[in-house]
Image (cartoon, rainbow, N blue to C red):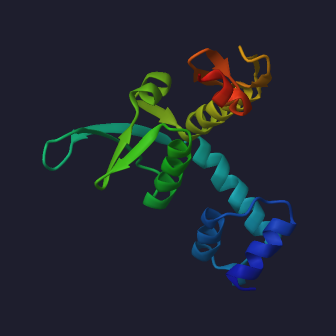
Amino acid sequence: MNAYAMLDAMMANGTEGSREMFQFIGKNDPEAHTVDEMVTMWNEQQAGTQDAVITIQRGRSYDGGFETAKMTSDTLDFDAIWELGEKLQAVGGLQRLSGHEIVSEQVIQALGETFTVGQLKAYCAMVNTQRAQRDAEMVYCDCGCTVTANQVMSASLGTSCPDCYDRMSC
């Protein structure tokens, strides 16, 4: 069975598919294992990955223009750290600038200088949950309408919804 067929079979078996999983299959000869064996190996790797330690390494850019704070790990490879960085970037906790990573101070304060993959994923889930709750919060505007908090606009006559903004900005 080739790697593509193995990925399809694992996803049909209820295992979540991703680029990371495809790379895992490529490293572990799909011809030599059954789907159940690969699922077991994947789950064991994921369980071990949750406990992998990430350390923030501080430094400066090559030209000395800004400070950097990048994630490093002795047990994770570059691709795994990159994907974790993507998750952190999606919640606003990481910037990539001129080939450098800058982990925000807010993330470092919340997780510390050393944390596990599980703690990082839990932090990202918490931020996403807080965003969803904030976006779902309903607010009463001065124009008389009730809208979600992320739609409220400030006008010269008070707060307004997008539909009433022109009328409230006299």
Q: Nearer the viewer, residue 164 or 26?
A: 164
What residue is at 49 percent from the left and 23 percent from the top? 110
Front position in the image: 57 or 93: 93
**In the displayed structure image, the side of residue 123 where residue 144 appears, left or right:** right
Image-based side of 17 in relation to 114, left or right: right
> Does residue 38 appear in the picture of this structure?
yes
* Horizontal and vertical percent position of residue 9: 82, 73
In this rendering, the answer to whether 17 lies above or below 85 is: below
Snapshot quadrant of residue 20? bottom right
User: Image point 40% across, 49% down: which residue?
Assistant: 74
For the point 55% across and 45% down, the residue is 90
Tell me the quarter of the picture where residue 91 sits.
top right
Q: Nearer the viewer, residue 58 or 135?
A: 135
In the rendered image, the residue lying farthest to the right is 13
Residue at left 69%, top 53%? Answer: 44
Rendered-image quadrant of the C terminus: top right
What x and y, as percent, mark residue 130? 67, 27
Residue 76 visible in the shown view? no
Q: Residue extending furthest left? A: 63
Q: Is residue 115 above or below residue 99?
A: above
- On-image quarter of the N terminus: bottom right
| Above-or-below relation of 113 to 158 | below
Number of numbered markers: 0
* 95 or 117, nearer to the observer: 95
| Residue situated furthest front in the rendering | 170
Q: In the visual, does 137 lie left or right of 166?
A: right
Query: Residue 122's image quarter?
Result: top right
| Residue 83 pos. (x, y %) | 53, 54
